[in-house]
Image (spheres, coloured by chain):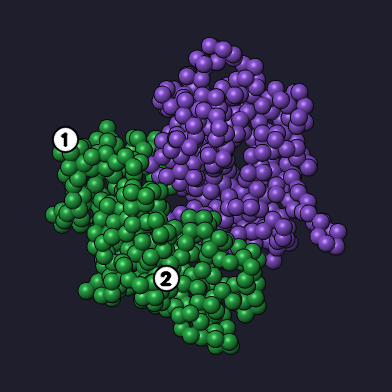
Chain colours: A purple, B green
Amino acid sequence: MSALLQAKGLIQQYSTAKTFLGKTSTMRAVDGINLTVREGEILGIVGESGSGKSTLGRLLLGLESPFKGKILYRGHPMPEPRTAAWRKLRAEMQLIFQDPLSALDRRLTVSAQIGEPLEIHGLAAGSERAERVAELIAKVGLRQDQAGSYPHELSGGQRQRVVIARALASNPRFLVCDEPVSALDVSIQAQVVNLLRDLQDREGLTMVFISHDLKVVRNICDRVAVMYLGRIVEEASSDALFSDPRHPYTRALVSSVPKIGAGLHGRIILQGEPPNPAARPSGCAFHPRCRFADADCAATIPELERHDGRLAACRKLRHTLRPAA
Amino acid sequence: MPFVSVRDLKVAFDGVQVLHGIDLDIGRGEAVGLVGESGCGKSVTWLAALGLLPGKAKVSGSVTVDGQELIGASPRRIEAVRGAKIAMIFQDPSSALNPVHRVGRQICENLRLHRGLRGDAARAEAIRLMDIVGIPSANTRFDLYPHEFSGGQCQRVLIAMALAGAPDLLIADEPTTALDATIQAQILDLLSNLRRQTGMAMVFISHDLGAVSTVCDRAAVMYAGRIIEANDISQLFAAPRHPYTRGLFDAIPYLDAGRARLSLIPGTVPDPRHLPQGCAFAPRCARAGDLCRDYQPELKEQAGTGLTACFHPIPTGSASRQEVFA
């Protein structure tokens, strides 16, 4: 599979508002990320809140320009936001949000919402647009008689289908799904996950799937990158990552998912708080919560490198730490 | 006699009935899970029992705590139970705390109301409680405001407040839903340790079946305002009898399973204003027959496998999921 999107040395930082003494501080949301999204795959990005996954998603879409580093889309650099070239690219890449109700315009009917991108990008007009909208409604599994409904008349899962239909209107090649099923109930979640998967199979769409729900990520993604405080700490195929996590953080994360019938026995329970990007620990950002950490970990930032054919950023993996004791 | 006993509890908002007669017993020290999708009435059950619903809600039936009737009791009588015998924690910890008061003061308020502690005694007890729930350096953090705590720590503060009245029953309404995975694990661990130490009973309301199975002894599954299945955790998860329970289990992806397609329950949860006649799940159910569409099945004891409200329960020992949702 060839690379659709490549991120090289991405860094994004924000400065906080001035305090009353006139000081500002900067906060790094994304801190040096190299990532390749291959054509036709679903790449999962997991991590806790504040780990920079949504910022990374926005950077990959070119919705904001990085402070440092660059993004190549089909080998060409991503154009600057709000330029003509950038606008043209919008039709090819779309974003699906977490909360469908706030992502939709409450005063527009379903068909008007779905038709809007066709109008904006000048893709279809008149009866052709109506046909295309009907086709999209069928594609995401809505009923044709729902075309005239308003968002408040639909259930959560149906609204998310409208958001997906609208994202698909301009025939995108690349989708970023930012927590697309987190706000949905279990039985509805399964419907939306299956729909996204069908889209990958049938249309060959490439997706980045951002989520904190590891069970869903395990189910839908081909490859997974685990983020901790703005950096990728482990990257592997979904099968390898969940059956044999290597980085101590990934191991804790995978073990923290409650398993039916397993009880609390044998789970790794991390001490301490989720990281605060405004006060980043020195060296490996995970070392204050890591049970294997030593002085070395507090001093140097580990690089994402290969250990036994797997990408992970941990100094301890070099010698002592072998998988699953 | 069970500690809490709920009988035929019904709730209606503006003439729309949302709870259709709940029967549930909770023994002393027992942990019971309530499972279901949003809108199935799992939270309303307890809000109604504790008199926390707005005035327009019509509540009928009976809820007794230690033999004392709560439905229709005077506010004063209910207040004596709420917080002291039964405490509740909610999903979103940061909005359950008052942002303009220091957290220590908020814990002390509960200690004053329920245990009559004031001044230094209250402060010392509040710090002890903060220690118990695992807030580091409680002494110095006593005077901080809620915004200075992370989400997981706010939830710990709320648990400390709930413990202030030394309750016999803790109702945890989606206590880990808003938290990150590693913090979720910490809070689940804390709750089950507290239960072991204090011997209090717990009702754990959640849509996360995995979380329920790790902390509870028994669970009840709700759908459209009714309990449709109740059983011991191990039996319920090993052999669900109600097609909805089975569908719910199958819809959850598993970490150790591969990229198999998720099996799903077709359709959506019915609108409480337009409930189908008969079993509310019948329109989504592959096993439904004519009987299901006309009559409401009652929650009945099935041979050795707990309570199920279904005319055509899944036979025990059937393992294939295709059978249910072909």
Q: Nearer the viewer, residue B206 or A115?
A: A115
Quarter occupied by the N terminus of chain B: bottom left
Q: Position of residue A205 (x, y in %)?
A: 54, 27
On screen, B138 above or below A276? below
Question: In what element is the residue under mark 2?
Answer: strand
Q: Position of residue A318 (x, y in %)?
A: 62, 54
Chain for mark 1?
A: B
**In the shown orientation, is residue B156 left or right of residue A191?**
right
Crowdedness near tag 2: few (<14), some (14–19) or many (≥20) residues, C-alpha within 10 Å: many
- Who comes first in sequence, dot 2 or dot 1? 2
Determine the residue positioned at 57% across, 61% down.
Answer: B94
Q: Position of residue A237 (x, y in %)?
A: 53, 40
Quarter of the rendering containing residue B194: bottom left
**In the shown orientation, is residue A67 left or right of residue B313?**
right
Residue annotated with mark 1: B290
Quarter occupied by the C terminus of chain B: top left
Question: In what element is the residue under mark 1?
Answer: helix
Q: Residue furthest left?
A: B303
Q: Residue furthest right?
A: A22
**Can see residue B248?**
yes
Determine the residue positioned at 55% across, 53% down.
Answer: A250
Q: Return the mark for residue B87.
A: 2
Q: Nearer the viewer, residue A95 or A203?
A: A95
Determine the residue positioned at 57% across, 12% down.
Answer: A126
Find the distance from the CA under tag 2 to the CA under tag 1: 44 Å
Q: Nearer the viewer, residue A45 or B36?
A: B36
Q: Are marks 2 and 1 on the same chain?
A: yes
